[in-house]
Image: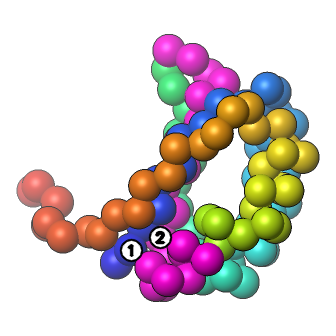
Amino acid sequence: MPYVLIRHRVGNYAKWKRAFDAHGGARRTHGSKGGWLFRSAKNPREVLILLRWNGLRAARRFVTSAELRKAMKNAGVRGRPEVFFLHDRAKPPA
């Protein structure tokens, strides 16, 4: 299963979270199967998102889309996000 891990900073978490939630339909339309949202314990304006995708190609298209760049800008993302494309290869520990 492919995953995308995105790490970025936000100016205002509450504003960003509203925009992130509102953008869920666009993620699903492009192949996201949902995921997990994390905030740094040290810096609550640092956000990490781990999303499952139905295919790596669809994930790459979405992450590099003008639609996502615009949504992130409007949500108050600061700086350039770090993006990692991952595959689940190992079984989780028991």
Residue 28: x, y in percent? Answer: 68, 78
Residue 29: x, y in percent? Answer: 72, 84
The region drawn magenta spans 42-61
Q: Where is 16 relative to 94, above or below?
A: above
Contact? badges 1 and 2 (CB < 8 Å): yes
**Residue at x 38%, y 74% (from the top left corner):** 2
Secondary structure of residue under mark 2: strand
At label 1, the amino acid type is Pro
Residue 9: x, y in percent? Answer: 65, 31
- Residue that numbered label 2 is attached to: 52
At label 2, the amino acid type is Arg
- Dot 1 or dot 2: first in sequence order is 1
Left or right, residue 79 beside residue 53: right
- The quarter in which the C terminus is drawn is bottom left
Left or right, residue 43 beside residue 93: right
Q: Where is 31 relative to 26, above or below?
A: below
C-alpha span from label 1 to label 2:
6 Å
